[in-house]
Amino acid sequence: MGNKKYIAYYRVSTAKQGASGLGLEAQQYAVAAFLKGEKITSEYIEVESGKKNNRPQLIAAIEQARKLKTL
């Protein structure tokens, strides 16, 4: 995948999922498997319903991607 910079955004819907780590762990495993050893520049984690449009960590991840010119 070269010298690309990767930003990961993980979201779980409930505090219970976030506290258990099961939802987050599965997402982190999937991202790591996709990247095959490439480094993640930054990670953003959010516990928020998918129905809500206000997701501060998603916005932060997008802003970081724009700064790094990964978008």
Image (tube, rainbow, N blue to C red):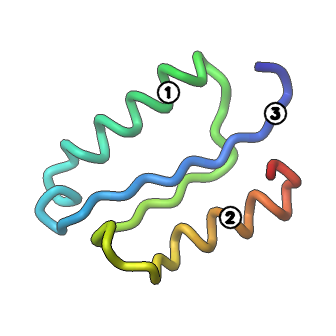
Residue flagged by tag 1: what amino acid is it? Ala
Residue at x-position 28% and y-position 71% = 49
Crowding near the residue tagged with mark 1, few <14, some 14–19, many ≥20 C-alpha atoms within 10 Å: some
Q: Which of disc 3 and disc 2 is earlier in sequence?
A: 3
Residue 46 location, x and y as percent? 39, 66
**Rounded to the nearest whole Å, what is the CA distance between mark 3 and mark 1?**
14 Å
Residue at x-position 46% and y-position 83% = 54
Q: Is residue 53 found left or right of 36 in the rendered image?
A: left
Compared with 64, 32 (above or below) is: above
Q: Check if mark 3's residue and mark 1's residue have beta carbons within 8 Å.
A: no
**Rounded to the nearest whole Å, what is the CA distance between mark 2 and mark 1?**
20 Å
Where, quadrant-wise, is the N terminus in this rendering? top right
Instruction: State the SS at label 3.
Output: loop
Q: Which of disc 1 and disc 2 is earlier in sequence?
A: 1
Residue flagged by tag 3: what amino acid is it? Lys
Q: Residue furthest bottom?
A: 54
Q: Check if mark 2's residue and mark 1's residue have beta carbons within 8 Å.
A: no
Q: Is residue 17 found left or right of 34 in the rendered image?
A: left
Residue 33 location, x and y as percent? 48, 20
Q: Is residue 38 found left or right of 13 in the rendered image?
A: right
Residue linked to disc 2: 62
Residue linked to disc 1: 32
* 2 vs 3, front mark: 2
Crowding near the residue tagged with mark 2, few <14, some 14–19, many ≥20 C-alpha atoms within 10 Å: some
Residue linked to disc 3: 4
Q: Which of disc 1 and disc 3 is earlier in sequence?
A: 3
Residue flagged by tag 2: what amino acid is it? Ile
